[in-house]
Amino acid sequence: MPFILARKLQMDQEWKEGKVVPVTVVEALPNKVTLLRTEERDGYRAVQVALGATKREFRVAQLPELKEGDTISVTAFQENDRVLITGTSKGKGFQGVVKRHGFGGGPKTHGQKDRLRAPGSIGATTPQRVIPGKKMAGRTGGEKVTRKTLVVGVDKERNLLFLKGAVPGARGSLVIIRTLE
């Protein structure tokens, strides 16, 4: 199961069989294997890789034939590989319920004044409290997001991966790429 740490560069587009495909360009510099966790020593199997000072651990069912100090590069991926990509979504600050949860808001007329983007009722009289988990205004974004996508292309000379569609996070943010089994 190939996996790699990478940095999101930019969005672009490629032409495939006369159709334009939106792609995200990701720079996946060689990752160094820093630690191999074994069932006997640690209680589980995992491979820890580093991209510069950033380290992440990937649990595996079977330890791959890697040694500490080996490198994992974009050559582990091929075109048309299905991958899981994980990143931190862009933070949007404190947002109301219309932007954060897609509420419809109240009516513009019929006796309303400034309740257009208000949440409406947040609970009934009987429990006399707000139920935990109620959708309300608050900080939006900045959360871990994972999505499935497709590898559209691999540039081995420049260590670039071209992934179909949008990838979570801002430019320059860390993304984790794993192949689907």
Image: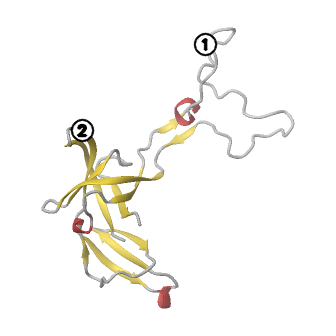
Quadrant location of the C terminus?
A: bottom left
Residue 51, placed above or below residue 124: below
Q: Residue 154: percent from the left, percent from the top?
A: 21, 58
Residue identified by numbered label 1: 108
Label 1 sits on a secondary structure element that is: loop
- Return the x and y of residue 139 as percentages of the image width and height: 53, 42
Along the line of sight, the residue nearer the viewer: 170 or 59: 59
Q: Residues within 10 Å of mark 1 (few under 14, many from 20)?
A: few
178 to 41, vertically: above or below: above
Judged left or right of residue 175, residue 115 is: right
> Mark 2 sits on what residue?
20
Residue 148 sits above or below residue 111 on the image: below
Residue at 33% across, 69% down: 2
- Secondary structure under badge 2? strand
The structure residue drawn at horizontal position 42% and vertical position 47%, both measured from the top left corner, is 89
Closest to the camera, between mark 1 and mark 2, is 2
The furthest residue to the front:
17
The residue sitting at 31% across, 83% down in the picture is 65
Q: Nearer the viewer, residue 93 or 112?
A: 112
Please report the residue visible at 46 percent of the width from the left and 78 percent of the height from the top.
61
Q: Is residue 150 left or right of residue 157?
A: right
Residue 113 picture quarter = top right
Residue 151, quarter of picture? bottom left
